[in-house]
Image (cartoon, grey):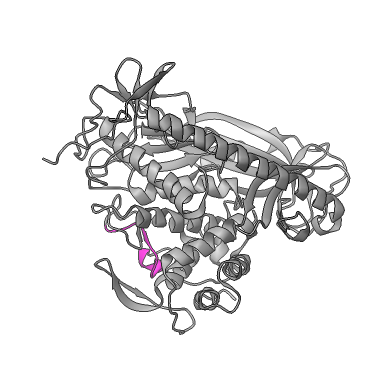
Amino acid sequence: MPRPLLALSAMVAAGVVTTGALVMPAHAQTGAARHATTARDAAAARAKAIARAKANVTRHAGAFGFGAGQALKAKDVVIDADGTQHVRFERTYRGLPVVGGDFVVHQKADGSFKGSTRARAREVAVGSVTPAVGARSTAAGALKRAHGLVRDAGSTPELIVWAADGAPRLAWRTTVQGVGDKGQPHGEVYVTDATTGAAIENYDAEREATGTGHSEYTGDVAIDTTQQADGTFALIDPVRGHTTKDAHNLSASSLKSSSGTLFTDADDVWGDGRKFSADRATAAVDAHANTAKTFDYYRTTFGRNGIKNDGRGATVFVHVGTQWDNAQWSDSCFCMMTGDGDGTTDPEQVDLDTMGHEMTHGVTSATANLRYSGESGGLNEATSDILGTMVEWYAANPVDTPDYLFSDQSTPPWLRRFDKPSLDGRSADCWSKSVGRLDVHYSSGVGNHWFYLASEGSGARTVNGVAYNSPTCNGSTVTGIGNRKASAVWYRALTVYMTSTTDYKGARTATLNAAKDLYGAGSPEYATVAAAWSAVNVS
């Protein structure tokens, strides 16, 4: 029997200081003070960049299609080492959210205007904002039946301006949520024209990946915990701010950040390391540790302070649903949810790349917010596959060895792979005009294939004991630049250049801009980024 999974107590030889209901280490208090100073400086720089960006939008209104009736909401700020600023905005028109109206302001360190990236070039004005067709006249009932909801948890209509494609128009966006036959969350967003009632688009309300598992994921690990006033320990990470809770098999659609029960323990030793463990803390160990690894990956690699870049820690739920063989991220509760598997062959969905994948959906939502349908939906899923896999490479865990096989721990031998995505029988290796009609988990194959080629190159090779053989769609030979550089290019493209409607052609442009920023237009890295896109038929 394996040794129990070990937890790193927040109580160390440095001693403790009592602060209200919690007992925290003295060194953590000092670190917290330093963090507070840094956070204040960062907040001031962010506010200054936003103010300058708003002024640039006003001065260069034509570049943004900004006019009467519109208002801006700052969503994210990226400040480069040389002071260059990239401020992302969403906009409203006469108080209504504009879908496809987002843009990025690029400005120099002194605030002078450099340029813009817009989701759509069209104006967003729609004239009257009074709908001619009510939200309840949509096909929501048929939608529920079509998606197998056995209990409707309600629907929420919202009036919006739809500018994601075609001429901007008034629309209803209705989120239909319910519970499936095994307690799993099940929901759709349904967009209809508010003048004619015609369907515009529908897509999944959740960002999720399906997987199964057969192994203990991360072995014996150290985890950061907090000792409470009564002497017990809790799965509250004092460094990153996330908490890990037992959902007690509540469905994901009914969870709130305040739901569930915080995991506590008397001796700060958690779980037993077994599959299908009767000790409910065993799943919590992997969830807590792998959430920390994801947080640390983004902070260490990109300087990103949490999922939303605001230092906020997420709530992590384990034991969600009844025999729910899945995991998902939810923006609404700012939480990560993991199921228990099918109860017979598949254990909990808490392995490294699955956790990294789902939490990366939160990063995407906080930045480019790639629309979860068509090619942008495939890019959304590819982003989570790519950066979730890089969490695994960052962790370098000896039990869960880094590879290019997504969810191989929870879905042996793998759920998706990067060198030749079509080996799963459904994913696309190469771009074609029909890619956007695939399920987003399969259209993501084009982006995943690009990442492998950019990282490792084409042809046969063995990496960490796993054999790969990656073809190219145009018969070319690609020499890789390593996954650290390839993922750095992708992350910068996501946070600086991609928008909600970016497609694969737009992703090529975005990543080339990112490669130029990071390595120079004449660099081998820039050439490889271009060559890898050509190799998957994106030109």
Front one among 522 and 125: 522
Quarter of the image with the C terminus is bottom right
Residue at horizontal 27 percent and vertical 47 percent from the top: 213
Q: Determine the image quadrant of residue 415.
A: bottom left
Q: Residue 72: image x %, image y %?
A: 76, 43
Residue at horizontal 69 percent and vertical 51 percent from the top: 87
For residue 409, above or below residue 139: below
The reply, left or right, for residue 501 in relation to residue 525 is right
Quarter of the image with the N terminus is top left
For residue 61, above or below residue 161: below
The magenta region covers 413-424
Residue at horizontal 47 percent and vertical 28 percent from the top: 255
Q: Is residue 198 visible?
A: no
The reply, left or right, for residue 476 in relation to residue 110 is left
For residue 484, above or below residue 371: below
Q: Determine the image quadrant of residue 196.
A: top right
Q: Residue 307: image x %, image y %?
A: 51, 43
The reply, left or right, for residue 511 in relation to residue 165 is left
Q: Residue 111: image x %, image y %?
A: 76, 54
Front one among 537 and 498: 498
Residue at horizontal 35 percent and vertical 24 percent from the top: 16
The reply, left or right, for residue 186 in relation to residue 408 is right
Q: Determine the image quadrant of residue 292.
A: top left
